[in-house]
Amino acid sequence: MKKNIQIAIDGPAGAGKSTIAKIVAETLGFTYIDTGAMYRAVTYKALKQNIHLDDETKLAEMLAVSTIDLKPSEKGQLVFLDGENVSAEIRSNEVTSSVSQVAAHARVRELLVAEQQKLAANGGVVMDGRDIATHVLKDAELKIFMSATVEERAKRRFIDNEKRGIKSSIETLKEEIALRDKMDSEREASPLIQAEDALFLDTTDLSIDEAAQAILKLAEEKMA
Ligand code: DC
């Protein structure tokens, strides 16, 4: 039995990656690593420091002297930036609409990818993002590419936002998601694409539990 496998989950915004990845990790007793939260933390700090989001050099310099920690808690994964809990702040509309711009820079990605590889080095991890199977964990034992229709993803973000007390409209969310998909998929540095050896999972008509069970079944086969 091979217990400490790496599970890579990629896909566009709102496909259900983080919710499902968390359940899979908890069930297997694995560590969940939300790489999107790391790009969000960098974006949050850049906005706070008024660093131009197109200034790759300044962003990389800022990141080189920053610490980003992901810590599990009862309320889910907490994100600490330079020791400060920024878990709520990094989900703001401002960060959400700017993060693709920051994530497009190769130097920002290099630094974060190195960190992500360190976090996953001992296996026993479920990592989600956009380039996990294609770049970060190329040798992951299980690779999933998860997606759902734009309509369904906007609906999920709307419900998610409501729970967080953030006001939004489904139409605006649809436009934002489509734009983010486009930016994430068309950027030069590690674009969002399905790895050749990844399995496609359409979550449009699946419940969270059904999607998690599908991945758990595959994980068990890999661990057997
Ligand atoms: O999963 P999320 O919505 O929190 O991700 C925020 C942004 O970060 C997303 O628009 C693309 C970027 N991202 C990335 O480029 N690579 C990753 N591995 C994770 C996220």
Image (spheres, rainbow, N blue to C red):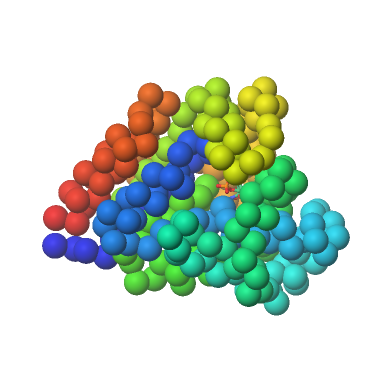
Vertical relation: 17 (above or below) 137: above
Image label count = 0
The answer to whether residue 38 is left or right of residue 24 is right
| Residue toward you, 95 or 56 | 95
Vertical relation: 124 (above or below) 201: below
Classify the position of the N terminus by image quarter: bottom left
Q: Quadrant of residue 180?
A: top right
Residue drawn at (79%, 57%), measured in percent from left and top?
Answer: 47
The answer to whether residue 55 is left or right of residue 214 is right
- Mark yes or no: residue 117 visible: no
Q: Quadrant of residue 201?
A: top left
Vertical relation: 167 (above or below) 138: above
Residue 187: image location, x then y, percent: 65, 44
The answer to whether residue 32 is left or right of residue 219 is right
Residue 166: image location, x then y, percent: 66, 40
Residue 207: image location, x then y, percent: 35, 31
The answer to whether residue 36 is left or right of residue 205 is right
